[in-house]
Amino acid sequence: MGRGRQKAKNTKIARELKSFSPSVNYSALERELGHPADENAYVDKWADQYADEYEDEKA
């Protein structure tokens, strides 16, 4: 293939990839990764303990 045909082929592939948007099942992905769905999962369970330690040092 010549340079022009190769560039045209690469451009075509790039356009296809740019417009490609697969549908994602986020709940299935979350189950697969093993993360719980509740909001308390994002709460740092050690934050209170460390906060208490630092308050004691300030006083």
Image (cartoon, grey):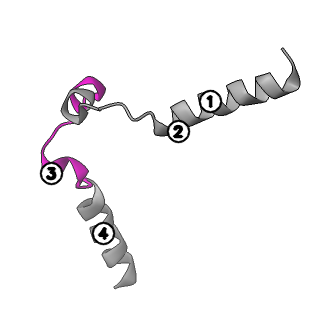
Packing grade of label 3 (10 A; few <14, some 14-19, many >=20) is: few
Which part of the image, by quadrant, shows the C terminus? bottom left
- N-term-proximal mark, 1 vs 3: 1
- N-term-proximal mark, 1 vs 4: 1
- Read off the residue under disc 3: 39
- Element at label 1: helix
In 3D space, how far apart are the residues under numbered discs 2 and 4 (Cα atoms)?
47 Å
Packing grade of label 4 (10 A; few <14, some 14-19, many >=20) is: few
In 3D space, how far apart are the residues under numbered discs 1 and 3 (Cα atoms)?
44 Å
- Read off the residue under disc 2: 18
- Element at label 2: helix
| Residue drawn at the location 47% of the way across and 38% of the way down | 19
Q: Residue furthest bottom?
A: 59
- Element at label 3: helix
- Read off the residue under disc 1: 12
Residue 25 placed where, x, y %?
A: 23, 31
Rendered view: 10 above or below 37: above
Q: Which residues are magenta?
A: 30-45
Q: Circles 3 and 2: CB distance less than 8 Å? A: no
Residue 31 placed where, x, y %?
A: 21, 27
- Element at label 4: helix
Q: Quadrant of residue 27?
A: top left
